[in-house]
Amino acid sequence: MPPQTAGAMTSDSPPSHPKLWLDAVNEWFTTVDHKRIGMLYIGYALVFLLIAGLEAVVMRIQLAVPNNHFVSPQVFNRMFTMHGTTMVFFVGMPILFGFGNYLIPLMIGARDMAFPRLNAFSFWISAFGGLLLYFSFIGGDGLYGAGTAPDVGWFAYAPLTAKLFSPGHSTDYWILGVFLSGIGSVGTALNIVTTIVCMRCKGMTMARMPLLPWLYLVTSAMVFIAIGPLTAAQMMLGFDRFLGAHFFDVQAGGSAVLWMHFFWIFGHPEVYILVLPAFAFANEIIPVFSRKPIFGYSAMVGATVLIGFISLGVWAHHMFTVGLGPAGNTFFTLATMIISVPTGIKIFNWLATLWGGKIRFATPMIFSIAFLFQFLIAGLTGIMLSAAPFDWQLGNSYFVVAHFHYVLVGAILYMIFAAFYYWFPKMSGRMLSETLGKWHFWLFTIGFHLTFDFMHVPGLMGMPRRIYTYEADRGWAAWNMIESIGMIFQAAAILIFVWNVVRSYRHGEEAGPDPWDAWTLEWSTASPPPHYNFAEEPVVHSRRPLWDLKHPQAPDSDYE
Amino acid sequence: MSFALFLALHDMDDMPAGHAMTEMQTHESWWRRAIQWVTDLFSTPTSIFSPQATPAHTIFSLSMLVLAITLAIFLAVAGLMLYAIIRFRHRAGDSNADPTQVYGSNQIEVLWTVIPILILVVLFLSTARVISVTEQARKPANALDVVVIGHQYWWEYSYPALGVVTANELHLPASDPKAPTPTYMTMSSADVDHSFWVPNLAGKMDLIPNKVNVMWIDPHKPGLYLGQCAQYCGTQHAKMLIRVYVDSPADFAKWIAHQKMAAENDPAAAEGRLAFEHTACVNCHTVTGTSAKGRFGPDLTHLASRDTIASGAIRNTPQNLRQWLDDPNSMKPGSLMPKMNLSSHELDAITAYMVSLR
Amino acid sequence: MSAHTAVLTQSMDEWQLPDKGKVGMICLIVAEAAIFIIFVLAYIFYLGKSLSGPTPAEVLKLPVLGTVCLLSSSLTVHFAVTALERNAARLSSLWLALTVLLGGIFLADTAVEWHELIYEHGLTIRTNLFGTTFYSLVGLHASHVIVGLGMLSLALLFAVAGKLNSSHAHRLNVLSYYWHFVDAVWVVVFIVVYVLGR
């Protein structure tokens, strides 16, 4: 394959005619190329990461001292609602599907996703959902001038979301924005499953497929099963609010607990939908920088499938304090504890991959190593919370907030950063700066630990979540101040990261097709790949086709 | 470690770990001292590590076991990770040849599947026992019954057998471990979801409209215990504070007797009482012995006997009361009590009346 | 993963992977099934919990005509597909037309039923829990019937205009999967609402 000139995003246009910016915009708006769509998702998610990050900054300033008056309770309640909703639906989902979109066809030797137009539609409808949600800041007033952005929490418990307790349209924007993003998620998941099942290149049996597509396959299957309940619950809530239905109308005999069940039947698999792609990145990056194949490929696949299944049956561990009764509490404790077994297996397999390797600490790898430690901690605090009586104390407290931020930031966001540093060269033809990368890593890690390690303490000291302020006599003030200071480091690190991305896009060192000496098919294309990915359909004989090419005397196919 | 496990399991039925520490012991085992250190570090008013009642004690013991196990796992695995990234790093002088390619090992994988399962069995069985002991405890005949109803943003407490209705400050009798008189709380909500959480006394239990939940507290030490609503319920969720006064049985009986009495009819506050009864106040509030029979807001019959107003958020002083009556939203923005638009004179009078409701 | 085993036993020359259309439609069906299951669960949960108003036993009658028509339409659409596979385009249009007709009768039957429920029994979505869950579930299903009928009518239009031949058979087959799903959901709704629920 002829090497591409670095920075040339459109390999098919004649090099002598500079593009009119209108033409460029039109190309991006009408593209059905999975690589472009992937980058649209990622760019969109980065913008919302900054916005939701600002919402977090506002909250941390308000909570830095007791009885603070930085923002009113109404504004604070909108901040935590929007922060959570945005981060889950308009940062997490898009960025993970963006990477999946970009990488899966390349990794399986295909030319595009199975349904390119559906792919584009899925992106644009999700994007519109996000814009609709944020329009609520302006348009949420409704008839009574009540409400702007939604302020019911990202899980929008009934009956707080009933028209009676949430007049105005703020809740409706929550329903609609998230509903649309759900449609987009299902579309993308459909594309991923179909692409993986139907478009693998010659010789790539399922057992020879890299782990990233495997994990996205399980993730997408979970999307089909988990998004439905959320969509259904939102339709029901919409019927309640607009048509006078009584699904969650307690006055008419409706049940608030039913909303919780439906929401968490979605909500728990959702967090695994968010974390499995992070595992997928780890499965690709850790082996390459340890210079060894992933330890126990089959176990990794098996553990992932097991996690997928079990995660559908643990949802009520979010409801231990609701009064499920001893049988319910015991069952969900057991199921949640069981899921720690396949999860632990994954951690051990990564450890075994490192073991006996020759570890290189490039930026993708240091983020991955931090991920390993932090995910271990997150998993252990999860085990603590799985013990229902312990959860009766810790549930709905800042201990839970610390736990899930440890997973979402400490594990998932760290792997997203790792993925960025690892695949940015492929997507743009240029390397991200290692120096800025190390600054990004250390500043962010200091900030992350200041904020989220210490956040466990107020939880243990009785601080519930979603409070816009707290009493001075509870002993929480010092801890909250430390957490808020940590936020400053994280903000600085993110800015450095954004600067790194923007600058390296044009001025980074040229990458070439395979800057990391890796082994999967995407590294056999130019950086960035041509529009059609592969001039000829690849033929593979093992899980690491490029390893085989680089080591003809000891190909993987002899050992698998 | 297994002995420690055994003792921890044993601990779950009886005395709290804290109790054992303050007594002189012939041998202070290291792990008991470690637990004491943790407890001292966390002895803030609402810490879950300062249990003062069952079931907080029971949960505390389980939590120590869980923490011990997870700490051990963390040290082992993180230790191995740290070792790996140091020992197996690519050093400057190393050749660039790739190391031996290892694809897996069935024996190792079986080992690290079986060991976690065994750990989980221990953890699960201990946990299941605590769930059962807490949720399936037999209710003693002389347990006290309290009904708790959550409102936006205050707590309604009533003692049906004793004929007492009050708000925001809960009084319970201390219970003698030899002849327990626990308090059984039947809970629901008048509007949205709330959650009752007083960490020193018990785990939290949600108050859900159209659903009845039950929890019990068996407090041993008299004192004031703090908590707050733990389920987001709207604008002033943060200020829906809880104050539980555990009284000695004698003091509790006195309190009940006082609360059962109809409202004070202090002649000095007659003007205020008249104003109160002729304003919309009576639509929301109850003062027994008057025409005020509203149920939307807290019962005010013995308002002056409480330390705080606005569900623990504001000290109960005449000055604060007056400001609250003037404009509740100036002190608790989002409170459902409207501005009553009273004249300054009316405010003085009604405040005086409120202060007289001892 | 039958695709996996199928592929493993084939040599490189016969690299055959499943059909995109079928896999995609199956994915969509799974996702839609998840939504329907939640509405069915809500219906079952709220059985007998209405505080007032009409109950299922009082007002529901077995929708025999609609059910027979809808389930038969699965048969007719299947014949439409097999006809098109044999390149019998005119025969295929006939079966398609019959499918659309039968589906239309089902919708009409539902409309008549709802008219009666609303105007004679005073049951609306806001009357009580039964009304809420009934109209939501049956309405959700009906909306899927409408979408399916729309797609089938489009196919019928193409068929009648002479534009369809055997190369389009596999697309018609994928569409028929959707239609079979809609019918399968009706079987569940019928059993839960009209048989068990009364």
Image (cartoon, rainbow, N blue to C red):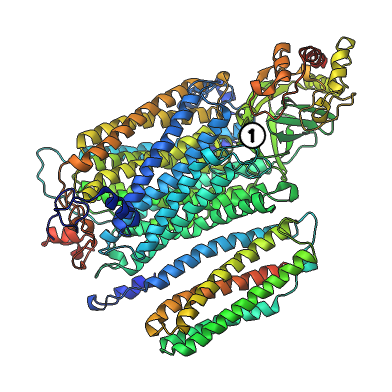
Give the residue number, with chain letter if any, for mark 1.
B55
Task: Work out whether residue A527 or residue B228 is closer to the camera in this orientation and state it.
Answer: A527
Could you tell whether A13 is left or right of C55 in the image? Answer: left
Q: Is residue B15 above or below residue A254?
A: above
In percent of the image, x 69 and y 58: which residue is there?
C132
Could you tell whether C80 is left or right of B215 in the image? Answer: left
Name the image quarter holding the N terminus of chain A: bottom left
Q: Is residue B20 above or below residue C18?
A: above
Looking at numbered disc 1 in the image, what kind of residue is underneath it? Pro
User: Picture coordinates of residue C52 (x, y %)?
Assistant: 80, 56
Farthest top residue? B268
Q: Is residue A30 above or below residue C81?
A: above
User: Picture coordinates of residue B72 (x, y %)?
Assistant: 40, 37
Task: Work out whether residue C45 or residue A228 is closer to the camera in this orientation and state it.
Answer: A228
In percent of the image, x 34 and y 75: which residue is there?
C6
Could you tell whether A222 is left or right of B51 in the image? Answer: left
